[in-house]
């Protein structure tokens, strides 16, 4: 169990969330590539690029959000 002063990156849930966002990025790029080159469908590769963009954005923003700390005087019950 991680205490209040520990590094959030050592948490198991942190790693799982990072893997999910990374998979989102990879699946989005694969979908965009398949939609563009294999199926020649604009809506599929557009959706793939959107999915990849969301995955990349969350992959970049999540560590920043994890580093922020709340006020210690707030009761978190």
Image: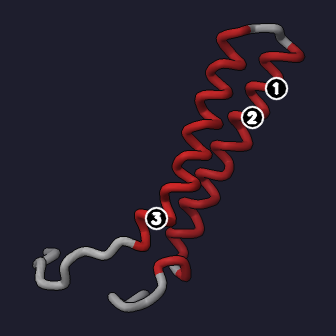
Q: Residue 10 carries which label?
A: none
* Residue 1 seen in the current view: no
Q: How far apart are marks 1 and 3 (CA)?
A: 29 Å
* Picture quadrant of residue 69: bottom left
Q: Are marks 1 and 3 in contact (CB under 8 Å)?
A: no
50 relative position to 29: left or right: left
Q: Which mark is residue 64?
A: 3
28 relative position to 59: left or right: right
Q: Name the residue under label 2.
A: 29
Can you say whether 27 is above or below 10 in the image?
A: above
Q: Do the residues labelled 1 and 2 touch (CB within 8 Å)?
A: yes
Query: In what element is the residue under mark 3?
Result: helix
Query: In what element is the residue under mark 1?
Result: helix
Can you say whether 52 is above or below 39 in the image?
A: below
Can you say whether 48 is above or below 36 in the image?
A: below
Q: Mark 1 points at which residue?
A: 33
| Image x and y of residue 68, in percent | 36, 71
């Amino acid at each position: 169990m991680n205490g209040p002063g520990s590094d959030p990156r050592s948490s198991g849930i942190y790693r799982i969330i990072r893997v999910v966002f990374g998979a989102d990025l990879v699946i989005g790029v694969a979908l965009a590539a398949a939609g563009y080159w294999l199926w020649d469908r604009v809506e599929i590769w557009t959706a793939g690029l959107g999915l990849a963009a969301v995955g990349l954005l969350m992959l970049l923003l999540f560590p920043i959000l994890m580093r922020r700390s709340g006020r210690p005087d707030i009761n978190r019950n």
